[in-house]
Image: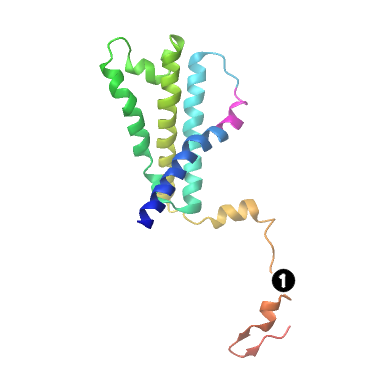
Amino acid sequence: MLKWLSVAGTLLMNTLLAVFGTAIVESTISSVFRVHTLSAILGKEYLLSAMCACSLGYLVYRRWQAVSAKWIWVIGVSWLAFRAIPLMFAEHTSAWSALSGSGCADTADGCMNWFVFTIPSLRLTAYSAGAALCSRLGHNDPHTIEDAWLGGFRRLPSPLSDNETSRKDDTGPINL
C-alpha cells in the first residue's frame, strides 16, 4: 500500500512540475521574444512549451530517476482526448480549430480549449520525452550537474576534523 502511495505522489509531483514548472520557466524566457500576430503567438507558445518541458523533464529525470516521469505522457494524451472526442461529435465546431489555437481568432472558447487542454497535454508529453531521452542516453548521474551549479559552494573537508583524527585504519591511528 505504501509503495502505491509513493508512486502516486511521484506521478502527481511530476505532473504538476511538467505543467506549472514549465509555465514558470517559460514565462521568464518568453519576454525576450516579441510577437504580434496570432500565428506567431501560437508558434512561440508551442515551441517554448515543448523546449522548456523537454529540458525540465530531462533535468528532473537526471536528478531523481523517477520512472513515472517517463509515463506522464499518458495523462497528457488522455487529457487531450477527454476534450477532443466530444468536440469531434459536436456539429457546430471543428475539433482542429478548437484545440490547435486557430480558433482563438473566432471565439474565446477556442482559446480556452487550447489553453486548458492542448498546452498542458503538450507540456506533459514533452516532459515525458525529455525524461525518456535522459533514460535512453544513460545520463543518470546528477553529480555533473551538481558540480557545475554548486561546485564553488560546496564545503571542502577539513584536514583537522575530529572524525578523521580519531579514525583508525589497518596500521593504527592516524597522526596529523
Q: Where is residue 48 drawn, in percent x and y?
A: 51, 30
Characterize the magenta stretch by its predominant secondary structure: helix
Q: Is residue 168 above or below residue 64?
A: below
At a point 59% along the width and 24% down the height, the residue shown is 33
At a point 44% along the width and 34% down the height, the residue shown is 123
In the rendered structure, the answer to whether residue 2 lies left or right of residue 29 reads left
Quadrant placement of the N terminus: bottom left
Give the quarter of the image for residue 106: top left
| Along the line of sight, the residue nearer the viewer: 124 or 130 | 124
- Within 10 Å of disc 1 (Cα), the crowding (few <14, some 14-19, many 20+) is few
Magenta segment: 26-33
Q: Is residue 25 above or below residue 112?
A: below
**Please, which colouring scheme is shown?**
rainbow
Q: Which residue is mark 1?
A: 158
Q: Is residue 110 above or below residue 65?
A: above
At a point 42% along the width and 15% down the height, the residue shown is 109
Q: Where is residue 24 drawn, in percent x and y?
A: 56, 34
Quadrant placement of the C terminus: bottom right
User: What element does badge 1 sit on?
Assistant: loop
| The furthest residue to the left | 89
Q: Is residue 41 visible?
A: yes
In the rendered structure, does residue 18 fall within the stretch colored magenta? no
| Along the line of sight, the residue nearer the viewer: 1 or 42 | 1
